[in-house]
Amino acid sequence: MARLRQEHVMVMREMVAREVPVRQVARDFGVDESTLRYHLARAEAAPDGRRDRKSVVHGWEARIAAVLARFADPRVGGEARDRVEASVVHGVLRREFDYAGSYQSVRRYLERAFPASAVRAIRRVETPAGVQAQHDWFDVGVRIGGARQPLHGLIGTLSHSRARFVWMSPTMHQLAWQSGHVAIFTRYGGVPLWVRLDKLRTAVASGAGPTAVLTPAFATFAKTCGFAVDPCRRAMGSDKGKTERAVRTARVDFADLFVHDWPDVPTLQAALDERSAEWHATRRCPITGSLIAEAFAQEQRLLQPVPTLHELFDCVVARRVSRDCLVSFEGRRYTVPFVWVGRTVDVRGTAQHVVVWAEGREIARHARRTAARLVIDDAHFCGESTSEVLAPTPLGRRAQQQLAATVLERFPAPSAVARPMAQYAHLLDALVGEPS
């Protein structure tokens, strides 16, 4: 027995009181005889009074409470999470109030005054194959082309088979977030029904857990791909424990790859994919008991097909088309076909274009972030009227001429001055001086 607990000592004391030999009791409990005799003697000894003596912290309770309140320690309100370390409290007492007691005295007082709350058990949940994946970011520094640079890894884990993949990116903005999901889905060979993720700014606009509000861009992306988003509760890493664990173990499983010098990110990505395949071929799925590669192959059959996405977008907003066939986006106004006047359309910002969607299809496209604040496509004003919107009045002959011709075309600049200015001045003087 490595260590005697109080209940063991009480049982051994009772056995000795029933005239069981001390040597036999020690042998039965697997302890040394001298250890047992020490505990028996200690139980019979008279108390030395140390228990009744006041602690060195006595009289400092108010100041300790003030220090805890200064740091907004949750123990003051009866909570147990994110407590201030006892060493911090001891350091403030020693520097500001000349406290002479030890760190251990402060630690023991905090344990007595604010005992730990009850521990909540965690429910273990295992989802069926093809139902859920868990995604999260992690940061790592990698040498690319001889220079160390920060990279972000999107790690995805299929909850059932435990198949795991990592996709690297130099950025974490919305386009990288969506690109990473497409890359992870491609490696899965399909799309699960649900994706559980943390409260990330690229995914969650506000709230957390069941009350979370997704960003419009990611909500549209998820709908297009055919999966539902399941955000975790705030500060509850256990809600996506498989990926949280994967983030920790990724630094071990891929540690040698992250310290290597790579010529570029695609070469690193190829090495990460190869390492994932090796990992799947050597480790077992806890649900099926088979190798992860075998469980992964079975789960792939239940995944939805990866959709064909022509473009990814980092922003999507709903806009109502005005009577002059314009929608507003990022401080500019863009035309759309006149038949959509008065209706609401989706305006998406891609890497290079502003794309307007309605009824599941693209209806207009313009260059994004142009210098012009008003971007017009004349073709959007042409076409046949509908029962709800009449076509704009056609351009007249003069308007067509004005739009088709430029000033220089109508009044070309002369190639050379035909008559010098001095000759014009002489003619003017002659006209003025000529008698009427």
Image (tube, helix red, strand yellow):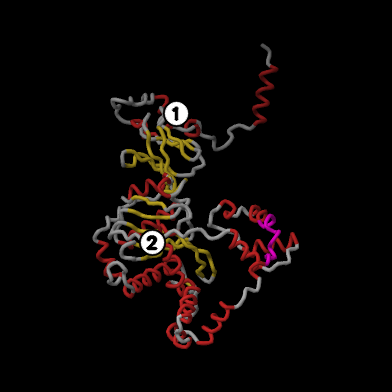
State the residue position of label 1. 402
**Is residue 61 highlighted in magenta?**
yes
**Tag 2 residue:** 156
Residue sitting at x 68%, y 16% = 434
The part of the image, by quadrant, that contains residue 18 is bottom left
Q: Amino acid at mark 2?
A: Gly
Across and down, in percent, residue 402 comes to 44, 28
Q: Is residue 153 visible?
A: yes
Q: Are marks 2 and 1 in contact (CB under 8 Å)?
A: no
Q: Which residues are magenta?
A: 53-64
Outermost residue, top direction? 436
Q: Main secondary structure of the magenta part?
A: loop
**Which residue appears at 42% of the width and 33% of the height?**
326
Pointer 1 local density, CA inside 10 Å: few below 14, some 14–19, many at least 20: few
- Residue sitting farthest toward the front: 18
Q: What is the x, y in percent for residue 410?
A: 47, 31
Residue at the outermost right position = 98
- In the picture, measured across the screen, residue 48 lies left or right of residue 195, that is right
Q: Nearer the viewer, residue 121 or 354?
A: 121
Q: CA distance from mark 2 to mark 1?
A: 58 Å
Marked residue nearer the N-terminal end (2 or 1): 2
Amino acid found under the numbered disc labelled 1: Gln
